[in-house]
């Protein structure tokens, strides 16, 4: 069940961060595009800035993006007061391995948060950390994502048939 997230919420604002903290999660690894910002956003929204101000106190926060535009990714990280890595090539786990090298967190202390099953969630499952899916903020995706969405829709369909999970039915 490598594509089924451990938790599923509508947005990053609906995630129970206190609960994660109690579960001893110390490091949050966020996807960027369509998870914390629209693909055309140049800067983080006021709401995201406020959220990060809060969670930065309790967690070591990273942005791990497949976006190849490193400047965009590092700009967001700088504004949000966290660290980042671009060109992560999720679902490969190289980016997550780098974070562990930098921080020494154990896998049970980490969670990955993103809007795509076939990149974010699969990378997290492969790496053995907690996976949290959110709905994409908008339908508009980067061109590299469009193919992933086709694969993802097939998985959603299969999981719904098997009664495993379905879009819009949130759980933690
Ligand atoms: Mg994304």
Image: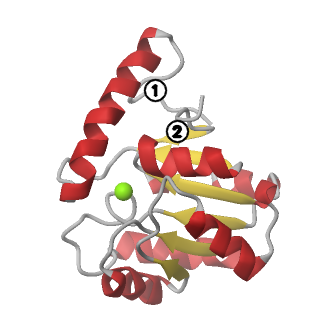
Q: Residue at x 50, y 72 (%)?
A: 63
Residue 82 disc label = none
Earlier sequence position, callout 2 versus callout 1 = 2
Ligand 1 shown in quarter: bottom left
Residue 60 appears at what percent x and percent y? 68, 75
Q: Report the label total.
A: 2
Q: Is residue 16 above or below residue 81?
A: above
Image quadrant for the C terminus?
top right
Q: Which residue is mark 1?
A: 169
How is the model colour-coded? secondary structure
Query: What is the crowding at mark 1: few (fewer than 14 residues within 10 Å), some, or many (at least 20)?
Result: few
Residue 1 appears at what percent x and percent y? 60, 28
Residue 38 appears at what percent x and percent y? 25, 64
Q: Does the Cβ of the disc 2 residue fall within 8 Å of ligand 1?
A: no
Q: Residue at x 23, y 66 (%)?
A: 39
Camera-side residue: 61 or 69?
Answer: 69
Q: Residue at x 80, y 54 (%)?
A: 108
The answer to whether residue 59 is visible is no
Q: Is residue 149 above or below residue 106?
A: above
Q: Which residue is mark 2?
A: 8
């Amino acid at each position: 069940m490598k594509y089924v997230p451990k938790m599923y919420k509508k947005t990053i604002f609906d995630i129970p961060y206190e609960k994660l903290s109690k579960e001893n999660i110390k490091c949050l690894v966020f996807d960027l595009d369509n998870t914390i910002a629209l693909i055309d956003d140049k800067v983080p929204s006021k709401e995201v800035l406020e959220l990060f101000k809060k969670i930065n106190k309790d967690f070591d926060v990273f942005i791990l993006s497949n976006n190849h535009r490193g400047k965009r990714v590092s700009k967001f990280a700088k504004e949000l007061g966290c660290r980042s890595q671009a060109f992560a090539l999720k679902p490969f786990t190289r980016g997550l391995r780098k974070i562990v090298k930098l921080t020494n967190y154990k896998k049970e202390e980490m969670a990955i948060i993103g809007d795509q099953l076939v990149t974010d969630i699969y990378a997290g499952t492969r790496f053995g950390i907690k996976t949290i899916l959110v709905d994409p903020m908008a339908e508009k995706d980067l061109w590299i994502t469009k193919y992933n969405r086709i694969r993802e829709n097939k998985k959603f369909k299969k999981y719904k048939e098997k009664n495993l999970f379905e879009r819009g039915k949130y759980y933690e």
